[in-house]
Amino acid sequence: MEATDFTARPTARSPSGSHTAAEFQYPTPRRKSWLSWDLESSEYDLLFLSTSLKLLLFPSYRSTDFEVHRNWLAITYTLPISEWYYDTTSEWTLDYPPFFAYFEKLLSIPAAFVDPKIVDLNNLNYDAWSVIAYQRTTVILSELVLGAVLLRFIRGSVDPSTQRIISASLFLHPGFLIVDHMHFQYNGFMFGIMLWSILMARNGNKLASGILFAVLLNFKHIYMYLAPAYFVYLLRAFCTSPSGKLEIKNFLSLANAVIAVFILSFGPFIVMGQIPQVLSRLFPFTRGLNHAYWAPNAWALVTAADRVLLRYATRTGADLPINLSGVASTSRGLVGDTIFAVLPNVKPIHTFIATIAFQSIALIKLWLNPTYKSFLTALTLCGYASYLFGWHVHEKAILLVLVPLSLLAAERHAYFRTFILVSVAGVFSLFPLIFTPGESMVKVPYSVLWIIFVYVPLTRRVYEFPRSLSFAIIDTLEKIYLAGFPLLQLLVALFPTFIKRRQSSVAIPTETCVSSSDFTCPEPDPYSGPAGMAGMEFLPLMLTSVYCAIGLVWGFCRLMFLYLNETYQGASNHI
Amino acid sequence: MDELSALPPEGPRKDPRRIRTISVNSMRSVQASAVARSHIDYEKPEILAPTPRQPITGSRHLIEHGAQWLNTVSHSPESSRPVSPTSPHRRSSTLSGLSVRFPTSMSSLHAAVDAAVGPADKEAEHAMAKRWIRWMHKRGMKAWVIPCSLLASACIKFCVGLGSYSGKGTPPIFGDYEAQRHWMELTIHMPIRRWYTYDLQYWGLDYPPLTAYVSWLCGIVAHRLEPSWVALDKSRGIETEASKVFMRLTVVLLDAVIYVPALVMFTRIWEPSRSKRTQNLALATLLFQPALLLIDFGHFQYNSVMLGFTLFAINAFALEQDLFGAFCFVLSLGFKQMALYYAPAIGGYLLAKCIYLGSVNGGKLFLRLAFITSLTFLVLFIPFLPPFAPLSAIYDPISRIFPFGRGLFEDKVANFWCASNVVFKWKNWASSTFLIKLSAALTALGFLPSVIVFCRVAWQTRLFDGQKPSLHTPILPLLPYALLSCSMSFFLFSFQVHEKTILLPMLPVTLLLSHAPLDSTIFGWGVLANNVAVFSMWPLLKRDGLGVPYIALTILWNRFLGYNPLRLPSRSFIQLLSIAAYAAAFGLHVLEFLITPPARYPDLFAVLNVLISTPIFVLLWLWSIKCGVEASWAIVGLGSTTSRPNRTSVASDDEKTAVHSRPVSLGVAQGRRRVPFGTENDSKTDET
């Protein structure tokens, strides 16, 4: 393993001589500092600050995910392991891989001490102070994994002061605040493992990287979005020599380790013969193309285009084949199949093909340039392609893009701009998760603060003057796009009062015609009928989704373009 | 022996730091050009003492010149002066006597502070806020410090607002939240005359008219947004999500409109010549003060409006806008009668100002102040006065605002009456009317020292006919201490005190501590007072379900300041006191967590809380009086009155003596290492 370590140094840029290569090696972090508290005061500050903030968020809005996780605590505590994936007491059945179930089992033991009612299987929708405090505390504590890994990123970094900003930005990411500490999930913990795996890749310990990724997959299978990049990277950089010969020893050690992880995780269920049941829980293929609120991906744009075309067709009477069931079943924020009225329908196989196609572009480049930076970009693109073109993507999955992309933020100005664009659009796309007005007062200023603290110091480090007219034009357009977000937020915030005014004015018969003159109205009158106002309620969501989708798709194009044009010097012949 | 040298030089150099100690106020400096001045000062081997503030009697052009010069320096903090605190070119014109080290000499004091910042890189490492501000400056984000602080504080306020509040979900009477909401409902549906009489059993209005007017405005907005939030009688106890957000929003907005600008103004006005960093640090300290955050945005009240108006008044006094200050203070009183706790200090200050200005100008000012004050009150109460209402109508608000009918104290509150009630049952011993008189007498006794100090200093520095008043009133530095000792004496001795009223003394305490260096006594007292204040409100916060914010905000703020009692001057009184107080408080919390109180004493922990907090508050009050007296010594010297001709001659002939104009500052004297005045005076006389 030591030998491979050396040959696989990821960032040796020059093939000529060990001297230059050594210069660019990442210093290997000291051993055993996992245990010693080598924290600087500023790092303690951030810990204090973020913990206080998270404590203050204890009473904030919780989604059903909170009850989901409480139910899992109860399932894993009360039931024997053989019934974990069969229990249907609550509608929130266990649908995460086994490691997460074991994790919940671990958490359920102290929970029973804190309050036995937490782990009572039939005590559905229990929301006493004890369970809130307990579950939220576990999120805060488990997120320390993320913090520890981010610290290690700083310690071994080439440019610690920049890496510190990036690490801090990840630890305080509004995405985590919204999804974990308000909405409730354990993403901080799991992204901690993911970053740990990436860290191992950076430090040249590819075997550990692969193992950690396998562990991560067994915590939450959504990380399969990233698996192709890992597969290609490990195969190319770890299992084959630079000349293309298969390194049998490495290959076997990696394969065995990964299989061992899976056996550790699924072993009990294999023994009990429950694998089909577990898999059916993990992969429910019965959902629609779009999630309740359209995740801002390519399909959101397609759906929006369909709406616009439908409207165009009904307005002008253009000769377009209209699927009437599509007109009726518009995805007005309802879970279920999306049927297009004008455009051809999208089937899971289409999304699958599109995802694979876009991923493979990045993967080919990765195969040719299996360096750490290249891997990181390909990893981001892999998650990105899955997010943009996947079937039934949830908006929370944007974190799969934002987190690895953050590590690339200070690479160059072009990367930085992509990072800012995607982060702003991505974080904004998470806003609808938290729809209660009180929490909105927190999420908006917090995200603004975050973007200030990330943008201002980093932009000074990487700034480049636009070099040509086309650059300048793109730059300006992106600025205009970003400037649109405050306006959009204003619209979203004021929309409820606006619609209320309108409803009261609609009641007066003389003003019924107002809706037709308003271009933002998504549904044409003849079809919306009395449900027109109900449809309007989802307008802010649709606008948010489409607006963010534009930025995210553009960000994807940018990043793909950057990646394909990037030259990873000496990578191919050095590895 | 002349009065001007009453505050002696620090003697020959003992400390290398002292080389930077310059007397900014030196006449020579005034005459020289800026560059030359700094050069001369720098080379000057002899360290000039700052001198007590004196009425100027020297030649006139010098005064004007000097005043101008000082003016440019002190009021343009953004001038070419480098920001770095370690820069040798830093010139300080304030007497920010916050340092403990050289309390006798005002500008050397400040130089000491500056010098302390040099090796203070170490010190700075302990303060999160300092580190953050330094980072912002290094990254070229200087301009972002204030917007970010304000945004962050707003974010924290909203976070606290997510939690519980007073009387949440406790029908039929609810709590302070419902009271404030009810007043909105009441004021928009009732004619003004009935505001103070409508259904008094259910949260009848018992705050002065300005609160009622503000409630009325908020009520109108609420009515426009959603009439059911403020529907008469039907909306009682309404707790819908949207209505809660609206109520929280009103607090944060009123706070942002009144209190926050007052804080920003304060940091700019009171320490104009300190570096931007120090000012921003002070602002951050003030913004995140946990007691106010917890009560206003957690428990739910509008104290920040009242405190903001008072702070505006204080700022106006520092700008010599006494009339505007008086107007602001009347608004503060008109918003919440609690501002009365400050009244003796403010009144004493204004009276002293009149004395200081001499018979003619002072008399004029007195009349103007009287006119403005009564006019403002008149306008505030005009709906209850003829011709708008019969004269008897004024009785309604007055009797509601001052509820003498209630007892000496109600809840467990950390003041003298409640604490002593543990061993001495006051109610059994004396009638209620007697107790009210007794409490009034004790309160007056409590605030009298600061008023006397004001008048004495004003009398000794008073201007004589034809003298131009100085740029800044000499009595101004006494004001924060006076505010503290007055409000503290009210808190300790007056009747019907609530635990929340500790917010009033906490304002001057936090103002004082905001500019103090980390290891100073003022800092130690300030943070201790704030922490104990939050601790004393623990029973209330616990009842409101604000336990988690209590812990989070207190720890965050202490971390923010880099506070650590062990780092205070070693074995000093304040250090020992702090450690003892924290140990007791921590022990009480652990006890409360572990055991339930016995049935015989259900309030056991609340009483213990009172018994821990009260001694600290009493000591704080005594300390504030001591500081006030010391500050007065620093200004006019120890008791000995001097004759006028003496002063005149000195002022005109000695170029070392200062122009009297000195910008304002917080917390003048910290007499820890005070050199005896008498001896120093003698040595000075010998020299001359």
Image: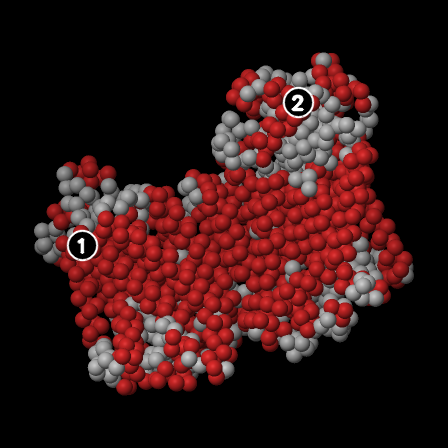
The colour scheme is secondary structure
The percent coordinates of residue A163 (x first, y second) are 35, 47
- The residue closer to the viewer here, B241 or B531, is B241
Q: Is residue B613 left or right of residue A245?
A: right
**In the image shown, does B234 or B31 lie closer to the viewer?**
B31
Residue A564, label in figure: 1
Closer-to-camera residue (A314/B526) = A314
Secondary element at tag 1: helix
> Toward which corner of the image does residue A535 lie, by quadrant?
bottom left
Numbered label attached to residue A61:
none
Indicate whether B465 appears above or below B482. above
User: x, y percentage for residue B479?
Assistant: 71, 41
Q: Amino acid at mark 2?
A: His
**Callout 2 secondary element:** helix
* Residue, disc 2: B61
> Nearer the observer, disc 1 or disc 2?
2
Label 1 vs label 2: CA separation?
A: 75 Å
Across and down, in percent, residue B57 comes to: 74, 23
Q: Amino acid at mark 1?
A: Leu
> How many marks do you count on the picture?
2
Q: Is residue A506 left or right of residue A386?
A: right
Residue drawn at 43 percent across, 61 percent down: A177
Q: Are marks 1 and 2 in contact (CB under 8 Å)?
A: no
On screen, residue A477 above or below B677: below
Chain of the residue where label 2 is placed in the rendered structure: B
Q: Is residue B446 visible?
A: yes
